Image (cartoon, rainbow, N blue to C red):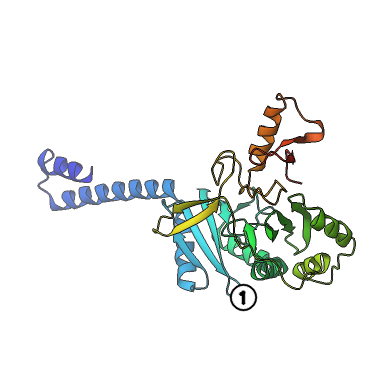
């Protein structure tokens, strides 16, 4: 556009006055600059760009652009040298929102921020408040065989701990570092009785791992010797990995329902895992599609035909 206007000025107006030509050039340059500033302001607030430059020069917090100028990633390091990634989207001037982070975000949902420094200071304080949460999760991950989630991170507020081939312990950790929603995945009477009696004596002065060991009267946590059935697949980097598959859908993951297949059949010679939703729907269908009482379906294991029950939800 600028070149075309310049050509028109020279060829059509044919200025024979140098001062007129310079004035025309100055006007064209000013118009082009105004248009460029308008486009830049429409893409992203110039103040944000200046703030990003200042943060980058400071060096204490990593800041990176995403796929567009409106997507950012901050990396905040805490006192224990943990690196926490925060993904941010620019909506309009003075309006930034948090898309995701490798942290529990329940208290941060739907919050709007006016600038990046406000986000940095808020999350630095939040990370300090999560110190007990980090400690408990790290202690669980170090001492226990974690069956789920796979590749657990600080964003995952729960762990499923291996007890035996048919039983896992589900436990959630609150941001304050307290254990909650503790229950068994599986129907082992042995572990169930220990858990029910032990929970009454939970000692809040002990950490979660020590409490679990006291409840189940163990000196160390069991380690799985085998996990069947398994599916062999290749990661993007070419490494081969195995994952537990469901005996009904023959998949490890369901698109709309997160979670691995579980040891829901308590027949020790069965060894087949199922997604809770798959087994529940199977049992309901076998019973004529009648809704089960109290949300608990009963019937026979699809593999070993032994009696089995399955609730609709994990609780």
**Residue 170 seen in render:** yes
Vertical placement of residue 297 versus 161, above or below: above
Q: Position of residue 165 (x, y in %)?
A: 67, 56
Residue at image mark 1: 80
Q: Residue at x 76, y 53 (%)?
A: 184
Residue at 89% in and 64% down:
201
Q: Position of residue 173 (x, y in %)?
A: 73, 60
Which quadrant holds residue 8? top left
Q: Residue 307, relative to residue 186: is it above or below? A: above
> In this rendering, would 300 be left or right of 67?
right
- Residue 10, placed above or below residue 194: above
- Along the line of sight, the residue nearer the viewer: 207 or 164: 164
The answer, for residue 92, to whether it is visible in the render is no
Q: In the rendered view of the protein, which quadrant contains the N terminus? A: top left
Q: Please name the residue shown 78% across and 56% down the image.
A: 182
**Residue depicted at x 57% and y 53%:** 100
On the image, the x and y values in percent for residue 237 come to 40, 59
Task: Say which quarter of the image contains residue 210.
Answer: bottom right
Question: As rendered, which of 254 and 43 lies closer to the eye?
Answer: 254
Give the x, y percent position of residue 220: 72, 72
What secondary structure is found at the residue carrying circle 1?
Answer: loop
């Amino acid at each position: 556009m600028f070149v075309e206007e310049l050509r028109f000025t020279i060829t059509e107006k044919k200025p024979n006055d140098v001062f007129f030509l310079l004035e025309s050039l100055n006007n064209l340059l000013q118009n082009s600059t105004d248009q460029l500033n308008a486009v830049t302001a429409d893409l992203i607030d110039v103040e944000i760009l200046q703030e990003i430059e200042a943060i980058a020069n400071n060096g204490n917090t990593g800041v990176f652009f995403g796929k567009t100028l409106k997507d950012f990633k901050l990396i905040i390091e805490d006192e224990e040298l943990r690196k926490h990634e925060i993904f941010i989207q620019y909506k309009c001037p003075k309006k930034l929102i948090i898309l995701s982070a490798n942290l529990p975000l329940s208290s941060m949902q739907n919050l709007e921020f006016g600038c990046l420094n406000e986000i940095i200071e808020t999350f630095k304080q939040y990370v300090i408040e999560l110190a007990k949460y980090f400690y408990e999760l790290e202690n669980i991950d170090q001492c226990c065989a974690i069956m789920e989630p796979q590749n657990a991170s600080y964003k995952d507020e729960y762990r499923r701990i291996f007890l035996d081939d048919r039983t896992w312990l589900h436990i959630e950790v609150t941001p304050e570092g307290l254990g909650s929603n503790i229950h068994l995945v599986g129907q082992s009477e042995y572990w169930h009785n220990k858990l029910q009696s032990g929970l009454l004596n939970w000692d809040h002065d002990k950490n979660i791992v020590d409490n679990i060991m006291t409840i189940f009267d163990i000196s160390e946590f069991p380690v799985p010797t085998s996990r069947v059935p398994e599916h062999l697949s290749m990661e993007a980097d070419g490494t081969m990995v195995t994952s537990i598959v469901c005996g009904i859908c023959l998949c490890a993951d369901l698109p709309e329902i997160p979670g691995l297949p579980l040891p829901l059949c308590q027949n020790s010679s069965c060894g087949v895992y199922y997604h809770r939703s798959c087994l529940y729907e199977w049992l309901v269908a076998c019973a004529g599609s009648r809704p089960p009482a109290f949300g608990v379906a009963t019937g026979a294991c699809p593999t070993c035909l032994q009696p089995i029950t399955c609730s609709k939800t994990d609780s």
